[in-house]
Image (spheres, grey):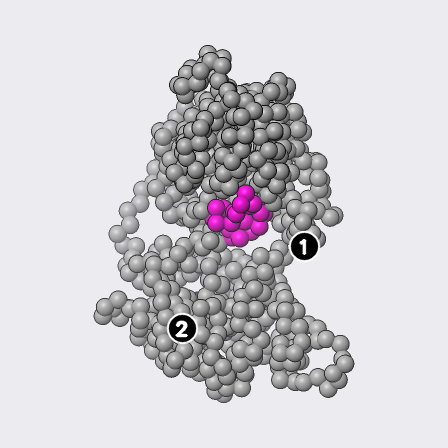
Amino acid sequence: MRAREPDEQGFVVRDGVRVAYEVFGDAAHTVLLMPTWSIIPSRAWKSQVPYLARRLRVIAFDGRGSGASDRPVGPEAYTDEEMVADARAVLRRVRRGTEADPVLVVGFSCGVAWSLALALEAPEEVAGIVAIGPALGLGPGLAERERHVFLEEPTDRDAPAAEGWGRFSRHTWLQGDYDGFLRFFFGQMFSEPHSTKQIEDCVAWGHEIGPERLVDTELARTVCRTPGFAERVAQADLPVLVIHGDDDHVRPYAEGVALAEATGGTLLTLTGAGHAPHARDPVVVNRAIRAFAERLWPDDHRAERRAWTRPGRRRRRALFLTSPIGLGHVRRDLAIADALRTHHPDLQIEWLTQEPATAVLERAGQHVHPASAFLASECAHVEDEAADHDLHAFGAIRRMDEILVANFGVFDDLVRDEAYDLVVGDEAWDVDHFLHENPELKRFAFAWLTDFVGWVPMADGGTAEAALTADYNAEMLEQRSRFPRVRDRSVFVGNPADVVDLDFGPGLPGIRPWTEENFTFSGYVTGFEPVGESDRLAVRASLGLAEDELLCVVTVGGSGVGESLLRRVLDAAPLIRRAEPRMGFLVVTGPRIDPRGLPGRIPGVRLRGFVPDLPRILGAADVALVQGGLTTCMELTAQGVPFVYVPLRHHFEQNVHVPHRLAQYGAGQRLAYEEASDPDVLAHAVLTEAGRVPTAAPVEKDGAARAGALLADLL
């Protein structure tokens, strides 16, 4: 799922070639994100589009040969002149009425050459240029790369396959290991450690164009390019910002320096960065583009009104960042916020989060910051990733990368414009990651809350998934070791024994000892008072239950990925009622599943959507059947209700971390979804659990108070 969908999209056609474009936003000023080498499409700008589109009108188009654009045959179709003509055609198509304001052009690598050529050919259309990792040819290339000749054919057909930059050849692409070339090339493009996701994206895009057309594009740049092209286009007279990493393994850093000198532009050196910093270090690049645009169009900011309060007159302010994936985060954060207020009664608490969490908070009378409206939906992404009770949670988080970048941009803007004394991130992965990547942006006390530590591979993912999870864990460990000051407090919502006794990966420390060393422990936070006997009877009476009637509550959480399990339960309900006629079912679909889409009129079954007081309903149940999320399972454990839980397939937290924790309390019966697909097996599990006398260990009741105390001294 994309972080932001286009407001307009279409094609322009030139000489029979369709070029796909997209437009985002409707601001007064426009930024054009130029295509680069057709080995990747305009989706390579995915980390820039949502951020920039909140301030500027953003235009992006797939260069011919990539994405949704056509793939014409022959080098002459991919010359510099064709690429510039495509850009001008797109601009003509999307201009509004008689609008003639020049645009900010952002180019990357090969796209820098076309950005400069566009400015030279049509100076009235370009207000300025941001040049990222320019591949222009102003100076010599990398020595290792220059030793190899693209058109050179091997003299010995039995010679070993080319290695290194020797893979950058027509022969290798067309008759050798094209996939091996892609993996090598993008490994050079992302020289930074822990760049697995960026490399993975680009390799997939590289396969879309294929080797034949990629050869055409390279010949267009090497054979068809007019002599002196680089020197000519570098004469463009306009504001230029050059962004270049000094660890660029594709184009030498000296080329960025030369371009800045030739144009009289500003040079932003990213020390330690590789060839594509807009993808690998998007926060610093996005902020640089924004600042450059503000210098081009200062009139956009003349109407701003700002205020400042002397410290002695300020109320303490805290910003809670609550994960919207599962409503348990909201309930526990509300309880922690209330506990925090007992230490600081004057504390002003605001919330930055998304639906469905925002609805719960507003119902509780909390102040949800208006900036929440700008957040891209994490729940919608998770639902898009899920199918038939299957959610590869680690993969879903990896593929949430553009959403996390976009949402961090919203957060960063907010804390830059408004002062907070404390930020509490309850599994706010975006903020924790990008603050460690950009520690200079921290200007508040920061507390991190989580109920699990460590990405864990699924067994059927094999060595590839094990390597990826280990790489993600290693990056986190390195960040924490290098910048311990980013988190002022790391709070594990649980106890040391609740942490899995595994390691982070080969050669990495054990998860439990590392967590004990780096976290404080609050105990579990339920966020509610367990239902007493009188309340239990009152809830059952409100549901219209007879004294001897049994109640099975079925719920799948707030993320909207449990519909297939609900259908399995509805299939098994008649079998359960035949074996136990007193059993009735209350099926709670949650805020993101419409109960009207499920089979209705099943005897003994009632369907409900969102239930705001779900813990009380769970406490009144005789048995429950739930998805394997930690919150609901612990709510049932705390209230002594027997339950069956069915973890989502490939969800490492529900299959590893949650069962380990429940084992500490001796609670719940785990049932694999494959087993739950058989109505007889599902019915047997529910009936067995319904007849079980609860023996779970008690769940601590002071977790919220302990967590609040751990945060209080940060204010």
Looking at the picture, how far across and down is residue 221, in whole percent?
52, 81
Looking at the picture, how far across and down is residue 116, in whole percent?
42, 75
Q: Amino acid at mark 1?
A: Ala
Q: Which residue is mark 2?
A: 19
Q: Is residue 182 above or below residue 399?
A: below
Tell me the number on the disc at residue 614: none
**Residue toward you, 309 or 241:** 241
Looking at the picture, how far across and down is residue 149, in whole percent?
64, 82
Q: Residue furthest left?
A: 98
Q: Is residue 343 above or below residue 89?
A: above
Query: Count of labels shown?
Result: 2
At 39% from the left and 26% from the top, the residue drawn is 346
Q: Which residues are magenta?
A: 381-401
Distance CA(mark 2)–CA(mark 1):
36 Å
At 57% from the left and 50% from the top, the residue drawn is 395
**Circle 1 — which element?**
helix
**Residue toward you, 669 or 152:** 669
Q: Which residue is mark 1?
A: 464
Looking at the picture, how far across and down is residue 84, in whole percent?
40, 77
Mark 2 and 1 residues: CB-CB less than 8 Å, in contact? no
Magenta stretch containing residue 387, yes or no?
yes
How dense is the environment of label 2, judged by Cα within 10 Å: few (below 14), some, or many (20 and up)?
many
At 67% from the left and 35% from the top, the residue drawn is 500
How dense is the environment of label 1, judged by Cα within 10 Å: few (below 14), some, or many (20 and up)?
few
At 65% from the left and 78% from the top, the residue drawn is 175
Q: Amino acid at mark 2?
A: Val
> Does any portion of residue 527 appear in the rendered image?
no
